[in-house]
Amino acid sequence: MTVRNLEYAINPRSVAIIGASAREGSVGAMVLRNIIDGGFEGEIYPVNPKYPALSGKPCYPSIAALPEAPDFAVIVTPPKAVPEVVAELGERGCRAAVVITAGLTKANGLKQAMLDAAKPHLFRIIGPNTVGFILPPQKLNASFSHMPARPGRIALLSQSGAIVTSLIDWAADKEIGFSKIVSLGDMADVDVADMLDMLAGDTETSAIVMYLESIPHPRKFMSAARAAARVKPVIAIKPGRHAAAAAAAATHTGALSGADRVVDAALRRAGILRVKELDELFVATETVARFAPVARARTAIVTNGGGAGVLAVDRLMDWKGELAPISPETIAALDAQLPDNWSRANPLDIIGDAPPERYRAAVEAAAADPGSDVVLVMNCPTALASPVEAAREVAALAKKGAINGKPVLACWLGEHTAKEGRHLLQEAGIASYETPSKAADAIAYLSDWSRAQQQLMRVPKSIMEEHESAFQVVRDLLRLAAAEGRTMLTEPEAKAAIAAYGIAVPETAVATTPAEAGTIAASLLEKNARIAVKLMSRTLTHKSDVGGVVLNIATAEAARQACEGIRDRLSALGKEAEIDGYSVQAMVIRPKAHELILGTSRDPIFGPIMLFGAGGTAVEVMDDTAIGLPPIDDVLAGDLIDQTRIGRLLAGYRDRPPADRAGIIAALTALSRMLVDFPAIRGLDINPLLADQTGVIALDARIEIDPARVEEKGPNPDLAIRPYPSGWESDIDLTGHSYHIRPIQPSDVELYPDFLARVSPEDIRLRFLTPRKSFPDQMLKRLTQLDYDREIAFVALTKESGELAGIGRLNADPDHEVAEYALLVRTDLQGHGLGWALLKQLVDYAVKEGLRRIEGLILAENVRMLAMCEEFGFQIRPHPQDPTTRIATLDLKL
């Protein structure tokens, strides 16, 4: 379950406190007092057979004695009583509770007994072992927090009760308010994903902050987080950043992909901004809640104090931020308005005596400069000018916290004289910070959040038709290894697998004896200046560790001797029986090439992951790698490269020209496709992948598999992010037109403007249930970049021109049982059956996905749509709250 019945928790009309008490210091007494003192306006029902009344309220001896079924319950009874209490609440008609009681564990059986009691009633449990549940706008403090929380628009989710009370205390001093505060406790039922789903659609919440200690259901979490982050900022702090790295696996990638790196990659891919410290949570929230994402964050700094500007720059550089280049035209314009001794560079130091008019001129110029994306305005208090008047002038320029469409942040230093200035700036929507460091941090948060939002919008494909033959090659190699009971492919097999997916490898042949290796070497040396010989073994995967690699061989005799040397070294180690042969390959000599590692591994939480970085034999020592979650596309592959130090070297420096970036990206996306296509792949290394201006080539490859899964088909169900659903393409011929129907792709955003221009305003109104004059770019991106675990859209494209002709869309509820559908066909193409074809595609997809029902909201005047639905088999009924709308429902036969 996910959001089922949670609405009773976030908007209750009545609350029962099971275990309420008059005993001073007891949890039951504190919770009851907090609820009453908080001013909750709904009904409050204390339940405890020991008392006739508590705190001026009638106290009921049992749940059955309550005058009505409460919407929400707070359970503070002893642990052994909780399962029975849950059963009684469910039977009474209550549907949600927070269990504050601790001590319900798997070991003592009480946790499962509680869940078993809840299941028949679809009863939702927050906890157990929580501080409680707080709804400040509804004046409900169902917790034992030591102080109330002020109302606001930030929702707080925490897996630690101590963090909840600490943040309430801290936020009170900062005048920060909350819409919801949820102490999740042990998450026996309701987890962080469930609450993200609930809060994504909560109109009282404009931003979500989370304290995460664990992520128990990764795909559910990723799906919920991506859905929430698309509509409002989500900021997280997760401890354990310096936990020990994952134990070495059969691949280098396994040793390099420490758990926290994977969490970082997952949060980034989900569109979540991660911060490191508690006090950063709300600084980050204040920043990202104010502004839309920015493509870049080149910062122009305006200051009346050079030292403050330098401090901001230093901190910004710590974050690898960017200073905006100030154009000569802007400098010339400011020369006419500023004193001769202004800095004429960024930071724009307008001198300590700067009056308000000077601030206006500099800020306007900084915001107008084409090289700037963000403006930071700073003020140091002096006796020569008023900080308040400077703030008033800057505030007058801003519109919703931006000037010329660019975010404006402010730092008014000091205490007494700065407070009023900061207040004026905040009233104008300008985010204001007390120190240069915090202001620079805020800019970094904005930049990081924007990058995360860009990653959020990427959903690459699964199997593509053009590599169907490659798929079969790899499948055969995996089957051969599995038939022999192997978990590792040999090096030649691994190279053959990656070569099938388009990654270049050296010419290689396999010898069974040193003498045969010499014969093969003679042939290869006719075309190559040098060759290499390597141990081939089904069991020894790290060849260099056992002396199994010999390079720079120039003669056939030397090749034979090299193989004999490998045999002798293995014999000395007692491992001669593990030699299966010797691979002889052309030596790739590229003196200015970079050694890279590309790899895949499995995280115990998030499943398959990908790694890119600096390769070679010292890969673990160098530890210059980046982690990403598959599937990835060209853009996400480029992001992985750019996260590493070697990524900057690949761009070229001194006498080394830029490496073939496109070739590296192609290799990364090839590995992504292999992970999507083959659930059996447990780990894969390409190390090194040589990259220079002439291209890329893999000198070594290693693939680990699960033999039991070689017959499983993709897309890989273990992926934390579901890939593009290939296999749902079809062609149809209708009267006068032929169409290609397929799932929507992110690139289809380019087809929308022309499509919408050819849909009548009336059809737009009927589709969206209200008139709509414009479709902002962000909305079009949201319509075309989907989380395929939750929603699908099929587009119909004209086969003649590839124009967008119609769209059918399904959006499933988080429980994945019911989906809402919508259709829109271009006005000039209606009446020929395209809408029917799209609806049939939606129904077929819903059945395959295991959905139980699809339904849609249709205006009563949309008689053509209603008629089509009736003919298709939908049941039509009036909307209970809106007489102008009908609900069309189709129960699916699974």
Image (cartoon, rainbow, N blue to C red):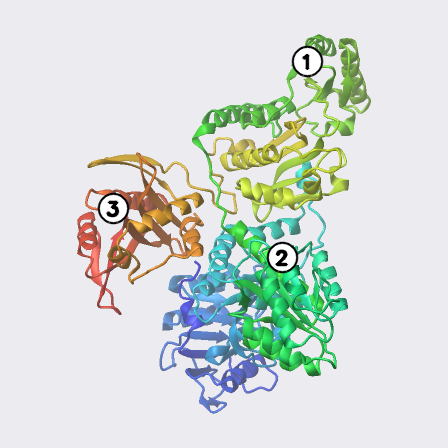
| Identity, as a three-letter code, of the amino acid under mark 2 | Glu
Q: Please tell me which residue is depicted at 32% across the width and 47% down the height of the picture.
A: 807
> Distance from label 1 to label 3 (Cα)?
63 Å
**What residue is disc 1 on?**
512
| Identity, as a three-letter code, of the amino acid under mark 1 | Thr
> Distance from label 1 to label 2 (Cα)?
72 Å
**Pick the front one: 310 or 347:** 347
- The mark found on residue 329 in the picture is 2
Work out which quarter of the rendered image holds the C terminus and state it.
Answer: top left
- Is residue 118 among the parts visible in the rendering? yes
The vertical placement of 95 against 592, above or below, is below
575 with respect to 79 (left or right): right
Q: Earlier in the sequence, mark 3 or mark 2?
A: 2
**What residue is disc 3 on?**
835
> Distance from label 3 to label 2 (Cα)?
55 Å
The vertical placement of 481 against 199, above or below, is above
Q: Please tell me which residue is depicted at 38% across the width and 78% down the height of the picture.
A: 64
193 with respect to 702 (left or right): left
Work out which quarter of the rendered image holds the N terminus and state it.
Answer: bottom left
Q: Earlier in the sequence, mark 1 or mark 2?
A: 2
Element type at marker 3?
helix
Report x, y in % for residue 589: 73, 22
Report x, y in % for residue 649: 71, 39
Report x, y in % for residue 837: 25, 42
- Is residue 108 among the parts visible in the rendering? no
The vertical placement of 265 against 303, above or below, is above
| Identity, as a three-letter code, of the amino acid under mark 3 | Gly
What crowding class fits label 1: few (fewer than 14 Cα within 10 Å), some (14-19), or many (20 or more)?
few
